[in-house]
Image (tube, coloured by chain):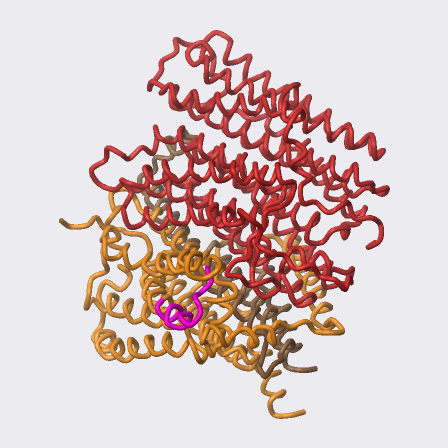
Chain colours: A orange, B brown, C red
Amino acid sequence: MSIASVFDIALVALILAIGASTILVRTAFAAVVMFAVYGLLLSIAWVRLHAVDVALTEAAIGGGMTGLLLLGAVARSRSDDVDRVRVGYPVRLAAGGLCALVVAGLAIVVLHPPAAVPTLAPVVMENLPPSGLGNPVAGVLFVFRALDTLLEKVVVLLALLGVWSLAPDRAWGGTPGLQVYAKPDPPLIFLAQLLPPVGIVFGIYMCWVGAKDPGGAFQGGTVLAAMWLLVIVAGLQKAPAISRLWLRGLLIAGPMLFLAIGLAGWVFADAFLAYPEGYAKPLIVAVEATLTLSIAVALAMLAAGPPERAQQQ
Amino acid sequence: MNAATLFGLCGAALVGIGLYGLITNPEPLRKILAFNLLGSGVFLLFGMIARRAAAAGLGGDPVPQAMVITAIVVAFAATAMAIALVQRLADETGRASISSDSSDAVDGEGKS
Amino acid sequence: MPATTVLDATTADGALLVLAIVLPVVGILLSFVLGGRYAERIAGVLLPAGFIVACIIFLKVWQGGEPLIYIVGGWQPPLGITLRADGLSVAMMVAMAIVICLIGVFAHANFGSRAASVETRAPLVFWVMLMAISGAMNMIFLGGDLFTLYVALELLTFAAVPLVCLDGRVETLQAALRYLLFALLGSILYLVGTALLYGSYGTLDIVLMSQRVRLEPATLAAATLMTLGLFAKTALFPLHLWLPPAHAGAPAAASAVLSAVVVKGSFFLIVRLWFDALPGLLSVAASQLIGVLGASAIICGNIVALRQKRLKLLIAYSTVAQIGYLFLMFPLAFSADPSPHHYGDALTAGMLQTISHATAKAAMFMAAGLIYAALGHDRISELGGIARALPMTMFAFGLGGLCLIGLPPTGGFLAKWLLLEATIATAQWWWAIVIIAGGLLTSAYIYIVLSRTMGPPNAPLTLYAAVPKYQEVAALGLACLSVLLGLVALGPIDVLQVGRPEAPMAGLR
């Protein structure tokens, strides 16, 4: 057995153990901490699967942002003690049986790949050069399956509006809570002064290299969002009121530009969401750059939660 | 067994663990956690499919990889929405138990 | 596997399909930046425009007898994504567009924001989500790629859940949370299926999939998980527990759109999956099982509806029952002795039931909302005299009820008639018993409500609020549509067969 496969087996065992413990531990706080560790391990798994783009996304969003969100929720919930209610033994047994069945079914499928494994990798590589992109994943996201990516931006916006819609009426248009951290401590403030310049450069870099190497709008946007949240949480800057026009403008700028370029493709290229020959790369880079900003704002506001205080005029 | 299959099996097991947590844990926050676990298991299945389809000099099929990126973002948005709901619910029930006036809450059902 | 793969090409007028999806998206983005005061005006322009686009697409497909196709970005599947409008899509698109437009008219009273000086919460959320639902539904009807359909399904979920708890009461928040968890479980199960299918066939395009599909463990596992997930989203018995509190607790306009439109999205995907993507794969035993779930939904939903004390809950439980009818098309279409004729008939019946339930149920929820607004409650035992106070509203409710029962000439009658015919033709009399029993139970609770409202009031009736005429007209308009739907048998019903491959024979089994 090679060292790599020993490493993989150990990694899988660790992922499964920590994953199971997020379900089994008694307190919600412990579960959330476990989950953050789990997210990091998972991104290593993605590297081992040769999917660096996904690894970055998983680390930034799946682990980082989701962990932050859950941590905030646990900190705010007053029920910080052990779960009070537990479902009965028969239900757990039945659920266990059902889940075992699902796992068995999936395992059978995993262990029996089709005789000829289908792949689109050659077709992607064949059609990538005209777009000027070097990263095939970016090619799929912004060229071949651009419609999915565009719709997904709308999904994020809707989720944000859904989160905002949970505000009490009196707070509408006001600023999100983030009250948990009412009194930021000096180390946090220090961190908030130190990290953002580095983080912002890193975020922009990630978006920029996304065209050629792993990285891209989501990952870059997430880093920017995290930096912004850090600054807000440390009290160095106030969270923006959700009625601000600049905020709304930033939120839709990315999807709007994407849509506009898509529609222009109707006129200047031969189809909706097609790029005119020779202009593909600059257009995609422009879309990615604006999307990075929009995603950063949307993710940060999603994590910040619904407005809680009315805006002071 | 190669790495792709190993992580595929890991994904399958995570789907089971997440599903179990989603069904058996009554606390909403823990259900949301379990949903994320379930989701990451599904993503690993995509990863296994991408990896075993490696060709043309790439480490994996980029199409399923791109789909996972899309799905991770959607799952995050879903988590944010669910958590906002849980918190609002906690705020409201906390307030309701303090004011101990639940009669109009019952009466308000089916409000137009 | 067939060696020849005919490549699709964008058809003339295929661009209309893009328009049907882009219009609502533009509306959502504009509403965000222009703010809540303009959201209603934007929806007021874009929703009717969407209806017109849907009608044009319908006419093109009906007259041309060929599906419209658009290749997005010029990238052929399996690499790219296609939009495809066949008979099923255009019929559903037009029907849902009408329902959504009339719900928009009705909602003006509750979410009107033209005169407001500042943006308020509920109107912005309602109008944006209404446009999002219209866009997501169009995407579901037109999408030719299973992963794009996943994104559309999530779009639909995220638009629907906030509508449930728009008024922020504890019960509605609980209902919304439960709905969200069910819906998320549903979409993730659907996603597992897409992963496995891609792993087997290297494509998620529905047409390519239908040419490549073979009976093997991966395909069966994928199809089972996807179907289970979509069952949860469609609230098929016994996964219906989230529906009644969510649909009954929402504001009337939201209840109407949730019950009439949203649950049909995931149902349509089940149809796409079994009839188009994986044709001929559904075994007779599995189709009988789906039928049993549908039948249980009809019986249980109706019995529970009969016992409800509140009007909106009664209507919500009747949705559970009516959803059951939709699933009876599976055992009838995939019977032991398949013939193209029954296959098409069962499909037509299912689609008709979808559309007539949409119109009738929207009308009934609107009527219930008006009654609630007028009386301040919806306790069925205290509805006496309301028929005299709000005759048009009660008339709309009654007509909707007739459609649910399935009396001629309503769309419900035609749908149930076709189902009954198919049960006889395929010699599956047991479903006929369920259909008839369901009709009797439905008529019992519709009768109870109608006789209460026409009876004398217990106490002198005080109306808290005047009911705007146009709201009553919107409800009545939908109710009339549900009645007139029965007449489509004379006309455009054949559009449903456009673009359908002939029924798969036993070859695959």
Residue in the picture at 13% in, 49% down:
A313
Report whether residue C26 is seen: yes
* In this rendering, position of residue A10 left or right of residue C104: right
Report whether residue B79 is seen: no
> Residue C403: x percent and y percent?
61, 23
Residue in the picture at 29% in, 42% down:
C36
Compare residues A20 and C104 and report the one nearer the observer: C104
Determine the residue located farthest toward the top in the rendered image. C456
Compare residues C282 and A46 and report the one nearer the observer: C282
The answer to whether residue C106 is above or below residue A4 is: above
> Residue C103: x percent and y percent?
44, 31
Give the magenta part as a residue range. A273-286
Compare residues C246 and A86 and report the one nearer the observer: C246
Compare residues C284 and A68 and report the one nearer the observer: C284
Determine the residue located farthest toward the bottom in the rendered image. A2
* In this rendering, position of residue C51 left or right of residue C227: left
> Residue A149: x percent and y percent?
46, 61
The answer to whether residue C20 is above or below residue C75 is: above
Which quarter of the picture shows residue C407?
A: top right
Q: Quadrant of the N terminus of chain A?
A: bottom right
Residue B36 within the magenta-colored segment of the rendering: no
> Residue C127: x percent and y percent?
37, 40
